[in-house]
Image (cartoon, rainbow, N blue to C red):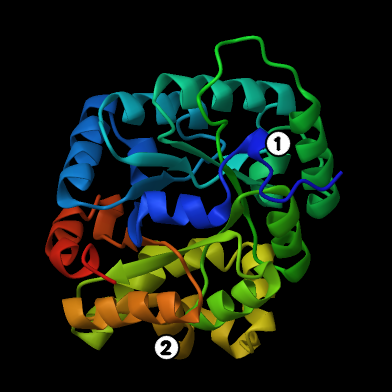
Amino acid sequence: MQQGNNPSYGTDGRAYAARIGRVGVWHGGLGRIPAQAARQAVTEIERLGYGALWFGEGHATKEAFTHAGLLLAATRRLTIATGIANIWGRDASATNAAAQTLAEAYEDRFLLGLGASHAPQVDVRGHAYAKPLAMMRTYLDSMDAAGYEGPAAARPPARVLAALGPKMLELSATRATGAHTYFVTPEHTERAREILGAGPLLAPEQAVLLESDPTTARTLIREHHLGFYLALPNYVNSLRRLGFGDEDFAGGGSDRLVDAIVVWGDVDTVRRRIQEHHDAGADHVAVQPIAADRGLGIDQLRELAPALTELP
């Protein structure tokens, strides 16, 4: 059953894009720090004017819905989005109930991002990773069929799907409010918008680093960002579709790949890249600050905020 942008599971993409604004923050580090430090960080992100806070879920980090509840409780206006909650981590009924609970408790500030994850993150849980597209379809069917007897929000929670390839993007257009793309370029954003069509929300992640020295910037990016993702076939296959090859994946990533995936330089350079995503069809761009030693990079978000939060 196809229910693209159906009110039974959330707001349509155009309305939701207006609600969360043009720029948000993606942050994996909040899942590895004490709750009080995470509350302080998300409070500042809200104060700086970003529209949404996205966070990931690893097999050994904070559980996605518990984590979302902690961050929602610490904020008043900011949308909190799972980017993503792993569908192998809990059954569809539990996910539906958790999303409904948070949507009602926090007045529509919770955005459910779902993803099929990657084999290493799934196999370690004791599951056999296979056929992510088919698994996602089945999971969405089960979510839509699940009952929920708790108090309902005025609007059911919106949901987006983690999508890189054409088929998952198509599923995002027909079975969700839109797509959340990660480890992508403005060229990918343009292709994603063509597949999604005009209606669904498109919210890519963009890694950023305020560092103008090429050697320093590229070394830090290779050591603290690219290395992890280049070990995951889903991302490598996505990059191949964009024209990157084996020579780009060796040695922690070629200069060409580093510069395509992470925008580094001054504030104006970062702003231009975010604008490129918007020009390519993005509704909302989630900036991820890259910092040494798994730092939070809040100083970078602070410096970027005046330029990014005023984007047209």
Tell me which residue sits at (30%, 82%) in the image.
272
Q: Secondary structure at mark 2?
A: helix
Of 220 and 175, the residue lying toward us: 175
Q: Residues within 10 Å of mark 1 (few under 14, many from 20)?
A: many
Above-or-below relation of 58 to 49: above
Residues at marks 2 and 1, CA–CA distance in whole angstroms? 35 Å
Q: Is residue 245 above or below residue 166?
A: below
Q: Is residue 58 above or below residue 166?
A: above
Tag of residue 255? 2
Foreground: 285 or 237?
Answer: 285
Closer to us: 236 or 215: 236
Q: Count numbered badges in the picture.
A: 2
The numbered disc on residue 88 is: 1
Answer with mark 2 or mark 1, whichever residue precedes in sequence.
1
| Image quadrant containing the N terminus | top right
Q: Is residue 276 left or right of residue 147?
A: left
Tell me the amino acid under the disc marked 2: Asp
